[in-house]
C-alpha cells in the first residue's frame, strides 16, 4: 500500500477513509483500568494496536496527501485518541479540520427489545481536508425526537455505519469530484488507464454506497 501510494497519480480523486478501532480510547477506560490488572492489560493492548495501525496509516497517507489526495479520519467525538500527540501533529501537518455529527441523524437506532427503533445519538467526529465531506456530514440532532441510551448490545452495533451514513459519505465525495477542474479529471483518466489501483471503470462517479443492507456496515 505504501509503494502504491508513493507512485499514485490522479491522487486528487482518491479519498482515504480511516476508521481505526476506538476501543483503547474510550473515556470509560479511565475508570476501567483502576478495576483490575486484567482490565488495564486489555486497554494497554488496544492502545498498542492502535499505535501500530496509526503508524502504518501515516506511512500510506503522507505520500497520498502530498500528491493532493483527500483523507477522512473517524472516531467518536470523545475518543481519547484525538488528544494523542501523534494524532494532533498529523492533523496540524495536513491542516485537517473537524466536523461533528450525531448517529440519530443518520438512521442509527437501538436494536434492543425494550428500545428497538429508538434513535441513538452517538456523537461522531470526522477530521478531513475535503470541504464537501466536512460540510455535508455536519448534521447534528435538532432534539425533535427522544433517544435510547447507547449500552449493552447496542454499544458494539454502533461501531459500524448505517446505510444513510455511508450514502452521505459517497454523496459528499461525489460532489467534490464533480467540482474538480476538467483538466484534473482528464489527467486522472489518462494515468488511470494503465494503473493497477485506478482502473478505467473506477473513474465513473459512484452513485450508491458500498452497502445494500439496512444493517450497519462494520469497520
Image (cartoon, rainbow, N blue to C red):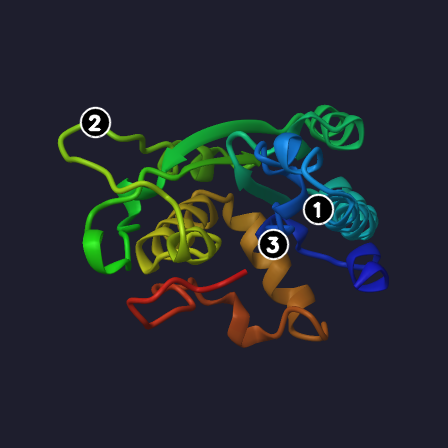
The residue to which callout 3 is attached is: 14
Numbered circle sitting on residue 195: none
Q: Is residue 111 left or right of residue 71?
A: left
The residue to which callout 2 is attached is: 142
The residue to which callout 1 is attached is: 39
Inter-mark Cα distance, 3 to 2: 33 Å
Residue at 39 percent across and 38 percent down: it is: 137
Q: Quadrant of the N terminus?
A: bottom right
Which of pointers 3 and 2 indicates the residue nearer the eye?
2
Q: In terms of secondary structure, where does tag 3 sit?
A: loop
Residue at 67 percent across and 34 percent down: it is: 81
Q: Are marks 3 and 2 in contact (CB under 8 Å)?
A: no
- Out of 63 and 82, give the one closest to the viewer: 82
Question: Is residue 10 shown above or below 211?
Answer: above
Mark 2 crowd level (few <14, some 14–19, many ≥20, 10 Å Cα): few
Q: Position of residue 169 (x, y in %)?
A: 42, 50
Q: Position of residue 171 (x, y in %)?
A: 36, 51
Q: Position of residue 13 (x, y in %)?
A: 58, 53
Amino acid at each position: 500500500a505504501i509503494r502504491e501510494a508513493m507512485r499514485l497519480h490522479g491522487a486528487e480523486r482518491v479519498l482515504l477513509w480511516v476508521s481505526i478501532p476506538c476501543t483503547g480510547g474510550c473515556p470509560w477506560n479511565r475508570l476501567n483500568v483502576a478495576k483490575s490488572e486484567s482490565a488495564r492489560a486489555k486497554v494497554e493492548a488496544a492502545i498498542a494496536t492502535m499505535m501500530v495501525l496509526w503508524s502504518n496509516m501515516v506511512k500510506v497517507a503522507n505520500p497520498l496527501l502530498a500528491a493532493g489526495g483527500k483523507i477522512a479520519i473517524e472516531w467518536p467525538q470523545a475518543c481519547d485518541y484525538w488528544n494523542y500527540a501523534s494524532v494532533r501533529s498529523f492533523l496540524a501537518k495536513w491542516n485537517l479540520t473537524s466536523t461533528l455529527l450525531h448517529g440519530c441523524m443518520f438512521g442509527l437506532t437501538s436494536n434492543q427489545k425494550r428500545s428497538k427503533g429508538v434513535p441513538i445519538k452517538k456523537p461522531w467526529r470526522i477530521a478531513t481536508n475535503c470541504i464537501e465531506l466536512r460540510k455535508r456530514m455536519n448534521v447534528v440532532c435538532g432534539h425533535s425526537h427522544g433517544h435510547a441510551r447507547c449500552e449493552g448490545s447496542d454499544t458494539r452495533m454502533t461501531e459500524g455505519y448505517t446505510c444513510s451514513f455511508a450514502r452521505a459519505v459517497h454523496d459528499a465525495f461525489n460532489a467534490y469530484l464533480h467540482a474538480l477542474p476538467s483538466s484534473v479529471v482528464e489527467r486522472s483518466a489518462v494515468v488511470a488507464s494503465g494503473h493497477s489501483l485506478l482502473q478505467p471503470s473506477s473513474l465513473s462517479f459512484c452513485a450508491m454506497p458500498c452497502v445494500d443492507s439496512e444493517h450497519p456496515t462494520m469497520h
